[in-house]
Image: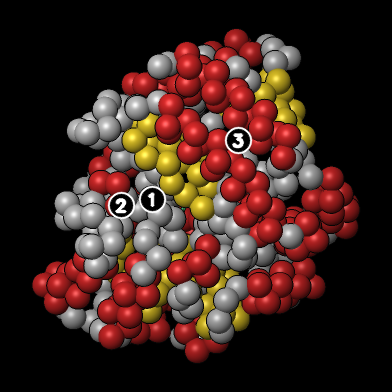
Amino acid sequence: MDANTVRTKHAELLFPCVANYYQEPIVLTEGKGCCVRDADGREYLDFFGGILTLGLGHTHPDVTRRVQEQAARLVHTSTLYPTEGIVRVAERLAAITPGALKKSFFTTSGTEADETATLLARLYTGTQEIIVLRHGYAGRSLQALAITGHSTWRLIPSQVTGIKHALSPYCYRCPLGLEYPTCEVKCAQDLEELIRTETTGRPAAFMAEPIQGVGGFITPPKEYFEIAVGIVRQYGGVFICDEVQTGFGRLGDHWCGIEHWGVEPEIMTFAKSIANGFPVGATIATEEVANAFTGLTISTFGGNPISMAATEATLEVMERENTPKRSAERGRQLRGHLDVFKETYPFIGDVRGKGLMQAIELVEDRRTKVPAPKRTLQLMEAAREHGLLLGKGGLYGNVIRIAPSMLVTSSEVDEAARRLALALADVR
Ligand SMILES: Cc1ncc(COP(=O)(O)O)c(C=O)c1O
């Protein structure tokens, strides 16, 4: 099938919500590391990696081999039978996550990982309300739509009660109109007022991403989580950290994003890069919290032998290659380029992120900070013309998200920056 036929059939046969990037969507056919090729034979540097999912880049040979071997031996058992694969992955997760996180539950997506986490928090505390953040994202179940703090993603009015949205630590567009650090992180302090006025005073949990991914890589100040989580715990709630985008070294220096903020969650969720593109979600909790989940429940495909082979191989390569160190080093290099671009182009309002999770927020002008979604789309198209694939995000659709494979080389980072520079010049 040629590329045009694929595009035509896609429009005809898929739900219209299965939206593609670019005016003329790219039909990808092959990938290796950071490089992808399309059906027309064009090559690109992929600096969004399937939405931060290809932590090791496309088709890592170790992951491919392990999945092929497993597929030839045993594909599916259901969780009615224990397997060596599921316990080995659980053991690895317990070893690399912070604090006393120990027991895992496996599913097939980030949505389900977050669903499992919020259900567990309710079972453990015996209370119902979940506090989340504006600009956050949790997936596509009815509860996830209610949690997601973006009108653009919610689609229907919230069907789930007891979800309360706290202020986002979005310093560039501070919801309180303050400046860090003189603000004294009031957005975090406000959680106390929220709990006292918007809830029964007994929340089950506070769930948040260390860096708000879909929100446009909103990066909270260093004091944020200690204050916020401290308040929630005072009122009996647990902290669920959603590491779906930030996990496994992505932010540099540590395995989990939240370690940058010095807080140990009772529950943590993973998906995306955990199996380098294979569909795996994981929820890990402390023994005490996990033991509250005693009723009947099942995820037919959760922890399936193929998924666990992919996960184990992925985590093994991440440890061997030291992805936290690589993300820190390559992230610094990437950030250096982005900071220079900010000095050159007044339509870049903000550069933010950590490690290999970096964003630029585009504005009409720096004084008014009016979002520039049209120029953002133009920049995406221009970058594509120069052979660079990027991500988009933010409530206003004006944030370029950059998150390549954590095995990206130094020369690939420089080459991507060279192509981005050409694209920025095109849309100036
Ligand atoms: C932070 C976060 N949580 C949860 C999800 C949902 O994951 P999935 O699309 O695998 O259901 C996403 C997806 O983008 C996410 O970014």
Which of disc 2 and disc 1 is earlier in sequence?
Answer: 2
The reply, left or right, for residue 411 in relation to residue 156 is right
The residue that label 1 is drawn on is: 218
Compared with 396, 161 (above or below) is below
| Front residue of 173 and 274 | 173
Give the residue drawn at x 11%, y 72%: 197
Residue 221 picture location, percent across and down = 37, 61
Residue 47's label in the rendered image is: 3
Residue type at mark 3: give it: Phe
- Disc 1 is placed on an element classified as loop
Which of disc 1 and disc 3 is earlier in sequence?
Answer: 3
State the separation of the CA atoms marked 3 and 2.
Answer: 24 Å
| Front residue of 260 and 161 | 260
Give the residue drawn at x 61%, y 66%: 254
Residue at the far left: name it: 197
Q: Quadrant of the C terminus?
A: top left
Q: Quadrant of the N terminus?
A: top right
Whether residues under marks 1 and 2 lie with C-beta atoms below 8 angstroms apart, the answer is: yes
Residue type at mark 1: give it: Ile
The reply, left or right, for residue 274 in relation to residue 240 is right
Residue 170's label in the rendered image is: 2
Q: Quadrant of residue 384?
A: top right
In this view of the protein, can residue 71 be seen by the observer?
no
